[in-house]
């Protein structure tokens, strides 16, 4: 269970987040939509402890983050072992091949043996449709493949929840579909996720709840049907129109 | 990683051992006798006939001062031990107790006698004017102004320098050189009009410079003396006594005749050393062998075969200094860079000051500081240790800046990706940031290694004889400057080129874009 209460953050005198409330039940998917600059990325980064915030509380699987400077090391370590993150720009480690990207954290953090971690890594890569690319260097992969490796890398830590920050925004449509297919399968398997995305069809299929952000404020929240078919807010309509192209 | 740690530990053990191995050198006559050696300082770069590398074995020094030192030591009941130091730094070596006495054509002067204990004279020298054969120049005509000004060359800081500046300073341009024979060659090649030299140098080098002629009689007679530390009157008194005995027995005359240095001026030594009756020298004058002079100038390939070996040995010292100091520089530099980027707030300005201080002051000054200042506070690192530490500390400043640039070049997203996977900051640094930064910094770091390689030549100021110093010494004693220069350059290139090639290979190997895919 991830619960965010009245989250506020200002940056350079501007309000980046203005009181966000969000709750994700285990096994469900929350979609966060909004135009760029609306605060989606900041919200996810706060939940992962990559950024501090000014007010409110974040509770993730028993770890509580409070306002102020960075949380303690132990707290953060515990939080990050239960909440994984996938970035818009993948951030694969360019000096390691795919399998090493996957096994670094399990070995360094969980103390897993190399062969154990590699067996799990190979299985995950197969699930992602990346069999045969174990020893490839990241730069030889397409964007879609890189993002799937990044998802697999996060999954290696067996996170209770996965945060995905616009996972397909940097990809062309065909590769985006590959990635979304993987995410849908994860959702079906009951992986808890918070996905900041512009992919409305994916949100409709996978998300239990959709949160709409505009200018750091949550202007609407509901089931996909409620939000997409009956938006109550004018701004939501604009965002939906923009996303539908 | 473990291998690196082991290497660093071994390194520090080596350093601490070399610190301990250096025995404190006591002063005083008793200590010299207990030790069994009289350590005397001189600079073989000064050349003949004082102290210069032997023709048949350039690793060994010879010269009339070398023989005189042996004779004095014998009188004291000990052996003489030569200690190489740069000429102008000999008094510093005396002060820091590296040596017991200075003996290297040092004139008796009020300034020096004020800070050091002077012995009685062991030689009476004069200043001889040299001009090109056929030129009708003499001291009087030099004193007349001419436009453009004539040029006279002298050894910087010598008595010749003082005399020329005082008496001719208005009329001629006094050009100051680091080496005696440089002046003589410059007269020969017409860059100078004249040079003023100590009489022993003129005697010794005349065969090398047949195109030069002595004009007029030697002027401004002066005395060579030994200098000891201020207050060491017992040692100096014993040396005075030894000189008197040597002179009484005619050994000084024999020695000076051997080098062609004996002349009427030396008769003044009787009174100066308080000798009433003097034996004639061993060898009758008639059978006297020709005096030792500078060997004829060698040229071309003969230089290579004769001095290649000894230059190669000195190149070994250059390599040793580099390979000992550079790993330490990298290690220190990495610590400084990490401290500046990720360390506590209070540490950052301190490390910034460290970097600026070391980058903003000359390496030579830093080496002086360690070598000549630390002994004042009771620390006595050896010359080797000083050189290695000095180079390492100096270069750590540059390496830290390179590392800082390399670390900054790794995108922040890499650290965040690592952190979000649960890695600690240290793990993120070690597994993600450092490996990527390393690839970025290899070319500039290798570049610095090559630079350090060449900077080891500065270590001659703290008595270390490496390739460049050896070149200077040999070039001064043989005048085969061009040949030795080429040979030395080839040796430096032979050492640095493989490095550059290895670095290019390493860089290619670490480049993920070229790795197998």
Image (spheres, grey):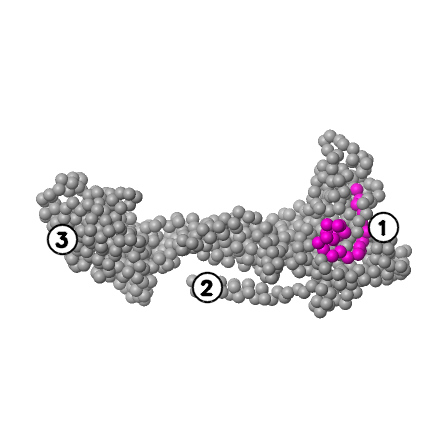
Q: Tag 2, which chain?
A: B
Residue where numbered disc 2 is placed? B5
Q: Which residues are magenta?
A: B104-129
Q: Do dots 3 and 2 share one subunit?
A: no
> Is residue B153 in view from this perspective?
yes
Residue B248, horizontal then vertical, whole percent: 86, 61
Q: How many marks?
A: 3
Label 1: few (<14), some (14–19) or many (≥20) C-alpha neighbours in 10 Å: few
Residue where numbered disc 3 is placed? A208
Residue A168, horizontal then vertical, whole percent: 23, 48
In magenta stretch: residue B117:
yes
Q: Earlier in the sequence, mark 1 or mark 2?
A: 2
Q: Tag 3, which chain?
A: A
Q: Do dots 3 and 1 share one subunit?
A: no
Q: Spot the residue most to the bottom.
A: B34
In the rendered structure, are the residues bearing label 3 and label 1 in contact, judged by CB atoms less than 8 Å apart?
A: no
Residue where numbered disc 1 is placed? B265
Which quadrant is the N terminus of chain B positioned in? bottom left
Residue A43, horizontal then vertical, whole percent: 23, 50
Q: Tag 1, which chain?
A: B
């Amino acid at each position: 269970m991830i619960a965010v209460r009245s989250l506020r953050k200002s940056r350079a005198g501007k309000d980046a987040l203005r009181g966000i409330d969000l709750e994700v039940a285990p096994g469900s998917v929350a979609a966060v939509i909004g135009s760029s600059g609306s605060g989606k990325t900041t919200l996810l980064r706060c939940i992962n402890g990559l950024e501090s915030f000014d007010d409110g509380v974040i509770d993730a699987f028993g770890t509580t983050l409070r306002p102020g400077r960075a949380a303690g090391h132990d707290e953060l370590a515990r939080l990050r072992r239960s909440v994984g993150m996938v970035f818009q720009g993948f951030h694969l480690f360019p000096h390691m091949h795919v399998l090493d990207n996957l096994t670094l954290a399990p070995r360094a953090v969980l103390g897993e043996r190399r062969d154990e971690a590699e067996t799990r890594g190979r299985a995950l890569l197969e699930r992602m449709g990346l069999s045969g690319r174990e020893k490839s260097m990241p730069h030889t992969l397409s964007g879609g493949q890189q993002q799937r490796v990044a998802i697999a890398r996060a999954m290696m830590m067996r996170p209770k929840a996965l945060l995905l920050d616009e996972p397909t925004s940097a990809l062309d449509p065909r590769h985006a579909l590959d990635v979304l297919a993987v995410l849908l399968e994860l959702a079906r398997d009951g992986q808890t996720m918070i996905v900041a995305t512009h992919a409305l069809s994916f949100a409709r299929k996978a998300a239990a709840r959709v949160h709409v952000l505009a200018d750091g404020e949550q202007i609407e929240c509901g089931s996909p049907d409620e939000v997409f078919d009956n938006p109550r807010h004018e701004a939501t309509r604009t965002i939906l129109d923009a996303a539908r192209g | 990683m473990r291998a690196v740690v082991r290497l660093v530990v071994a390194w520090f053990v080596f350093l601490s051992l070399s610190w301990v191995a250096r025995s404190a050198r006591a002063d005083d006559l008793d200590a010299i006798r207990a030790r069994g050696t009289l350590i005397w300082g001189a600079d073989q770069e000064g050349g003949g006939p004082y102290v210069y590398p032997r023709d048949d074995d350039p690793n060994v020094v010879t010269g009339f001062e070398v023989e005189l030192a042996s004779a004095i030591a014998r009188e004291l009941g000990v052996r003489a031990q030569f200690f190489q130091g740069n000429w102008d730094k000999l008094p510093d070596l005396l002060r820091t107790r590296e040596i017991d006495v200075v003996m290297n054509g040092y004139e008796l002067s009020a300034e020096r006698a004020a800070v050091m204990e002077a012995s009685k004279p062991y030689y009476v020298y004069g200043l001889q004017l040299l001009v090109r054969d056929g030129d009708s120049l003499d001291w009087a005509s030099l004193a007349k102004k001419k436009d453009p000004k004539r040029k006279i060359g002298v050894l910087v800081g010598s008595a010749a320098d003082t005399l020329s500046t005082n008496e001719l300073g208005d009329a001629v341009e006094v050009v100051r050189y680091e080496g005696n024979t440089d002046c003589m060659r410059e007269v020969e090649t017409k860059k100078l009009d004249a040079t003023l030299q100590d009489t022993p140098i003129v005697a010794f080098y005349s065969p090398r410079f047949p195109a030069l002629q002595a004009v007029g009689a030697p002027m401004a007679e002066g005395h060579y003396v030994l200098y000891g530390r201020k207050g060491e009157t017992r040692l100096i008194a014993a040396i005075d006594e030894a000189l008197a005995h040597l002179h009484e027995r005619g050994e000084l005359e024999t020695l000076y005749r051997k080098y062609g240095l004996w002349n009427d001026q030396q008769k003044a030594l009787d009174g100066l050393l308080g000798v009433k009756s003097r034996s004639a020298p061993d060898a009758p004058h008639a059978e006297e062998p020709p005096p030792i002079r500078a060997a004829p100038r060698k040229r071309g390939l003969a230089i290579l075969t004769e001095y290649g070996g000894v230059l190669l040995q000195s190149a070994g010292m250059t390599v040793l200094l580099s390979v000992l100091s550079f790993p330490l520089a990298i290690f220190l530099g990495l610590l400084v860079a990490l401290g500046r980027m990720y360390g506590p707030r209070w540490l950052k300005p301190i490390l910034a000051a460290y970097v600026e201080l070391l980058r903003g002051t000359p390496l030579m000054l830093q080496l002086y500081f360690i070598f000549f200042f630390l002994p004042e506070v009771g620390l006595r690192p050896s010359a080797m240790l000083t050189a290695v530490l000095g180079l390492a500390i100096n270069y750590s400043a540059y390496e830290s800046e390179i590392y800082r640039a390399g670390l900054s070049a790794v995108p922040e997203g890499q650290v965040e990706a690592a952190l979000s996977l649960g890695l600690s900051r240290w793990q993120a640094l070690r597994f993600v940031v450092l490996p990527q930064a390393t690839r970025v910094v290899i070319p500039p770091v290798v570049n610095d290694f090559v630079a350090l390689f060449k900077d080891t030549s500065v270590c001659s100021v703290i008595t270390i004889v490496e390739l460049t110093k050896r070149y200077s010494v040999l070039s001064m004693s043989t005048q085969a400057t061009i040949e030795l220069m080429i040979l030395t350059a080839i040796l430096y290139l032979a050492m640095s080129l493989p490095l550059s090639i290895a670095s290019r290979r390493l860089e290619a190997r670490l480049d993920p874009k070229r790795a197998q895919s």
